[in-house]
Amino acid sequence: MAKIDSNDVTDLINNFDKLKKDHKLDLSADEDLSIAIMNLVSIEEHFFFTAEKTEDKKYYDLLAGVREIRKDLLKKLVKETEGEVWCISKHLLASSMRVMEVGTKELGRGHKKEAYELFEKAYELYSLFWGVNLKVIPTKGIKNIGPKALDKNDKTKSGALSKFKDLVKKVVDCCIE
């Protein structure tokens, strides 16, 4: 796990707050865009399965059109394409959406505990997307310090995903108009 100092996270939150106040950063619009991208990935999947189930190839053409729109929109959020960040980002959003949908189905079946656990995992994946794309996750100097600790001084040891989830809650406010 990458070493992340809690002071760095506090500084990051303060910097985001300043940028939001100065109207230089609108993560609420980016959050809306990320949800739209999730749905476009889902539409791609539905066109694929519809093409296969109906054996009607026209759905592949529709899939290709939606894919181009998704790619264009994803470029607005994924600025760094180092390594496989592009694909990681796409799959984090797609996985988050799918896990959320499974959670919604469990909720509909009256399985609240299972649903809440799935919703938690979906949000952790979503938060990891933001951690990667807001460059909160440093990739240099990675060393193993324990499965849940962010650094050797981390006393909570609640895990990186949990900490990124908390960070996204503090930084991304979808209610900004």
Image (cartoon, rainbow, N blue to C red):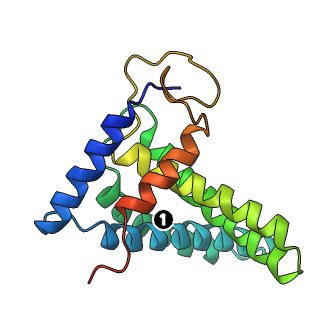
Quick check: 132 above or below 111? above
Quick check: 1 above or below 105? above
Residue 139: x percent and y percent?
Answer: 40, 26
Residue at 51 percent of width and 45 percent of height: 163
Residue at 36 percent of width and 33 percent of height: 82
Residue at 16 percent of width and 58 percent of height: 18
Residue 118 visible in the displayed image: yes
Quick check: 131 above or below 100? above
Would residue 52 appear left or right of 173 to someone viewing this image? right
Residue 71 visible in the displayed image: no
Q: Secondary structure at mark 1?
A: helix
- Graded by Cα atoms within 10 Å as few (under 14), some (14 to 19) or many (20 or more), the crowding at tag 1 reads some
Where on the picture, by quarter, is residue 114? bottom right
Residue 115: x percent and y percent?
Answer: 78, 69
Where on the picture, by quarter, is residue 141? top left
Near-viewer residue (122 or 6): 6
Q: Residue at label 1?
A: 67
Quick check: 131 above or below 5? below
Residue 150: x percent and y percent?
Answer: 50, 30
Would residue 44 appear left or right of 118 to someone viewing this image? left
Near-viewer residue (86 or 55): 86
| Residue type, numbered disc 1 | Arg
Residue at 83 percent of width and 83 percent of height: 108
Residue 14: x percent and y percent?
Answer: 24, 52
Would residue 18 appear left or right of 105 to someone viewing this image? left
- In the rendered image, the residue lying farthest to the front is 155
